[in-house]
Amino acid sequence: MSTERKRKVSLFDVVDEAAVSTKLARVNGSFTVGAAAPLLPVTINRWTGRTYSQRYLEILDKRKTLPVWQQKDEFLQVLRDNQTLILVGETGSGKTTQIPQFVLEADFLGKRPMVACTQPRRVAAMSVSRRVAEEMDVTIGEEVGYSIRFEDCSSAKTILKYLTDGMLLREAMADPLLERYKVIILDEAHERTLAMDVLFCFLKEVLRDRPDLKLVIMSATLEAEKFQGYFNGAPLMKIPGRLHPVEIYYTQDPERDYLEAAIRTVVQIHMCEPPGDILVFLTGEEEIEDACWKITKEICNLGDQVGPIKVFPLYSNLPPAMQQEIFQPAPAPLNEDGPPGRKIVVSTNIAETSLTIDGIVYVIDPGFSEQYVYNPRIRAESLLVSPISKASAYLRSGRAGRTQPGKCFRLYTEKSFNNDLQPQTYPEILRLNLATTVLTLKKLEIDDLVHFFLDPPAPETLMRALEVLHYLGALDDDGNLTKLGEIMSEFPLDPQMSKMLVVSAKFNCSNEILSISAMLSAPNCFVRPREAETAADEAKARFSHIDGDHLTLLNVYHAYKQNNEDLSWCLENFLDKRALKAADNVRQQLVRIMARLNLKLCSLNFSPDYYVNIRKALLAGYFTQVAHLERTGHYLTVKDNQVVHLHPSNCLDHKPEWVIYNENVFTTKNFIRTVTDIHGEWLIDIAPHYYDLSNFPSCEAKQVLEKLYSKREKDKQDTKNRK
Amino acid sequence: MESKYRALDSSNIGFQLLRKSGWKEGTGLGASEQGRLEPIQTQIKKNKCGIGAEMKKKSSTEHISDTQKQNSEKKPKAISKRLRKMLQEDQRMKEKEFDQAFFRDFWPDNV
């Protein structure tokens, strides 16, 4: 123990030294040549001072066979001579794991330069950093770490940090010049997440103020030139992937039913093509499970004349253990001379880039994927199945050529490919709600929203973001960030939820609002297996609160804590233990933020007001998400007057006149989900500025509010007269 | 294609705030006003038609407010019994799919 502590102290010293030399470098305006790299053969790990393990050397040999190693020197040269560089590499080139390590070896960056490498996905940040820690022969969380929302696995020693792009943005809020980093690597830039688009524009500014900072953008082929234009002609470097040729087949005519066509194609490949695994791209969980079942059935019907198969579904909501199963090898033939076995993976577009399965030789691409699109006119998100882009189609077909030459079957005509598919997938910035983003930008002091974006969103999307932030009090009448807005921006949450947390102490229920916010931020905790739907519904009913789903979530959280987070208790009650654990973790993080901001933690003693206060606090954040029950029996959203339906998962025992909702998602119907009963009087008490009738479209809700206002006026008069 | 929903106008506080920060009505955002003017259309796909097949049949309709939908649903009496049955089946599958979708991970992945 004592030696452990000693070692830490000495390493801290090294960090300081590096900081000093960094400063010196900046003063001199040039890069110092760092400590001379030890000459070969290296046996001592430069970062830890320990001798390299045997395993390190074994892995090193394998690493050296990755395509990216052939261009290591060239890369370092370009990095030395330029501030920004764009790296184009196919998946499988090894760029995500190797490039950050090359950067660390650069001798022109100082002794202990700190490097950040962003990832669009939490899972990738975690798994890649583990892998790299192993490759560098260090402990994860020390020299190499990761940071994702609600989980920081890094320390003062960390020199290479993998983090989600959203996390880098949050770090920028506290450290606007990102001074702790010498090099920032944006990986998978072609995915164009919301946070990444903000980072592009933000980093462009930072680079101007920090000539010593270097930026590496890594992307798949197609978007690279756009980035090059944006970053004033930064040099572009290409890294070959390990791709074998892939033959592309189109259909003669458009398919009447792409699902059926996909299944038919799987069967045909299995009967007629040489060995090799199959990857099928479909849209969503239900469709994928359905397809898996049908494929198994169809091939079983063929009997012994074909080889055995294993069919695996793959989608993001699948438990990690089941996601791992797809890496199993294909089944062996039934007898020695029998037809070969085959593995068949049916996946959403997560297998397009983020998850690589070796052994795939055949790809079936029906040309659809599922994505969320926000419509600012009705403030609703839609989960849409839509045609993929040409860029996606290329990525999909590339999956067939990972281990040997492959084939890709596109279930549409070549004409459709050329005419009906758009060149690029819409980046998130064009299709998501931007309220949180705008709050972040304001906090980063980027005020020129009009000219800021690389791919600018529609004006109305930005209007909706500004509107809600103004009503929440985060922006003043000139669009500047208020004190309240600044506090709200400290939470990594939707502005509505942040507002609710900030004001919850006023309603004497910040403990409860914390629990509800945590439950809403974690994945859905209710498990509903197909074979036990009734039992699951009964279990859920035991937690139900008749006044609303938010309160039901609170009940679940309380029960979970009362039962000491017992796993078998979770199982018996059809609750997802991972989701509850995540919620608990989120809650702890939020408590820490509350403490940092000096926000009081409090609860009301159990009384009739207990739940009333919680519901009022919910409303204080979500007053823009209210629906009113019309005489016709339909709900209409306030101000937008859209017909919405209570989602069948709700636990209300009645149809309240007013409800607040957490989400408004359009699929087959326009549903509102996670709803709680509130009173009309509260609306005019808590959010009179939003329920200002001088700016309210005429509708039934307006008439009801008018009556409430005049009743309020009358009551006031009465008390005055009585006095 | 024109959207069925009314665009936001100058009565909206967000509209006013955007104008205050330098945006001119009728223009796009971006360094050279190159941004799109209209939000992305949200069209709900209600069948399993492959790409190309759908474009001809026009079977995907823009999702419109429920009152309008009721009106438009009365018109196509001419469809055959078989097709109607197929559509109903599609609808049922969609509903089921939707239920599943809601039980899916809603955790924003990238923050």
Image (tube, coloured by chain):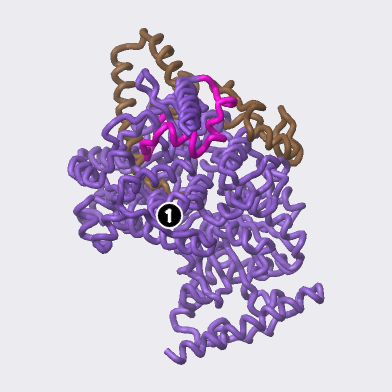
Chain colours: A purple, B brown
Quarter of the image holding residue A550?
Answer: top left
In-image side of A237 versus A612 (left or right): right
Q: Is residue A515 above or below residue A376?
A: below
Comparing A184 with B26, the one in front is B26
Q: Which residues are magenta?
A: A670-698
- Vertical placement of A275 versus B100: above or below? below
Question: Residue at 33% across / 17% down in the picture?
Answer: B83
Q: Name the residue furthest right.
A: A28
Q: Residue at x 62, y 52 (%)?
A: A483
Give the image location of residue A196, x and y in percent: 60, 52
In the displayed structure, would residue A431 be above or below residue A714?
below
Residue A240 in view of the camera: no
Give percent across and percent down for residue A90.
56, 54
The residue singled out by tag 1 in the image is A510
Q: Say which residue appears at 68% left-offset and 85% top-offset.
A: A36
Q: Amino acid at mark 1?
A: Ser
Query: In this orientation, which residue lies closer to the viewer: B5 or A716?
Result: A716
Q: Chain of mark 1?
A: A
Furthest residue in direction front, as rendered: A723
Residue A438 image position (x, y, % from top left)? 62, 46
Mark 1, other Cα within 10 Å: few <14 / some 14–19 / many ≥20:
many
Question: In the structure shown, which secondary structural element does the residue marked by tag 1 occupy?
Answer: helix
Q: Is residue A626 inside the magenta stretch?
A: no
Residue A190, image x and y in percent?
59, 49
Could you tell me if residue A213 is visible in this image?
Answer: yes
A101 to A39, vertically: above or below:
above
The image quadrant where one finds the N terminus of chain B is top right
x 73%, y 80%: residue: A33
- Specify whether A28 is left or right of A669: right
